Image (cartoon, grey):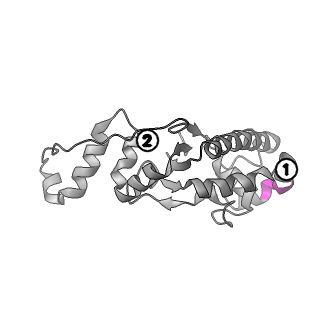
Amino acid sequence: MGMYLGLLTLRDDNISKILDSPPLIWRVLSPDDPEIYLYEVNSKKSGIISRWFGKKLKDVNVPSLDFVEGEGIDYDLDKSWHGIHYLLTQTEWEGEPPLNFLLAGEVVGDIDVGYGPARVFSSIEVKEIYNVLQGIDHESLKNRYDPDDMMTKEIYPTIWMEEQEDGLDYCLQYFDDLKSFISEAFSHNLGIVLYLR
């Protein structure tokens, strides 16, 4: 078990719909399970007393979000996300945009999708992320890799001292996949959703 960072491509108009109605995030993350969406909608509409006494879920229209080509592609950074964030920003949780994107973005309401709410970036923001990532290669990331500092800053999953070379290789492998994912989103003019689970 652990914290994994998921990413998913989504076009701007679907991102706007989700920001306007945060329970819709479940129609993206769990499209085959309308019950999660219904629970979220009903828990926002009903009071605590109704929930205590097991009030039945109200029937509401379960919207679907239509996807275009390239949309809805998902990717999982496994546990490498915090290590990659560190290599990009040299910080624990901070950093300058757009390099801090793995821990930033516009928050989708207060819907807990695992470890807090999902976050989104528009297609324009993805273009900025894409452009900055193009200038980053393995050599520059290797120069930023500091296992002592990573352990001091408690960079998840705190494996850096015991598996120094493996830890770096782990981050570099997932960084390459992340660049490919961002490139795919950029080439289809799509935004992205990020979520910790």
Residue occupied by mark 1: 142
Residue drawn at the location 14% of the way across and 47% of the way down: 54
When asked about the image quadrant of residue 26, the answer is top left
Q: Which residues are magenta?
A: 142-148
- Who is closer to the viewer here, 184 or 147? 184
Q: Label 1, secondary structure: give it.
A: helix
Residue 144 on the magenta segment:
yes
Residue occupied by mark 2: 29
Residue type beneath disc 2 = Leu
In this rendering, the answer to whether 147 lies above or below 33 is: below
Work out whether mark 2 precedes mark 1 in sequence or the reverse, and give the earlier one: 2
Q: Residues within 10 Å of mark 2 (few under 14, many from 20)?
A: some
Q: Position of residue 141 (x, y in %)?
A: 81, 51
- Who is closer to the viewer here, 124 or 59? 124
When asked about the image quadrant of residue 127, the answer is bottom right
Q: Label 2, secondary structure: give it.
A: helix
Residue drawn at the location 85% of the way across and 53% of the way down: 140
When asked about the image quadrant of residue 117, the answer is bottom left
Question: Is 33 on the left-hand or right-hand side of 48?
Answer: right
**Taken as a whole, is the magenta stretch helix, strand or loop?**
helix
Q: Position of residue 136 (x, y in %)?
A: 80, 52
Q: Nearer the viewer, mark 2 or mark 1?
A: 2
Q: Residues within 10 Å of mark 1 (few under 14, many from 20)?
A: some
Question: Is 132 on the left-hand or right-hand side of 35?
Answer: right
Residue 113 on the magenta segment:
no
Question: Is 34 on the left-hand or right-hand side of 14?
Answer: left
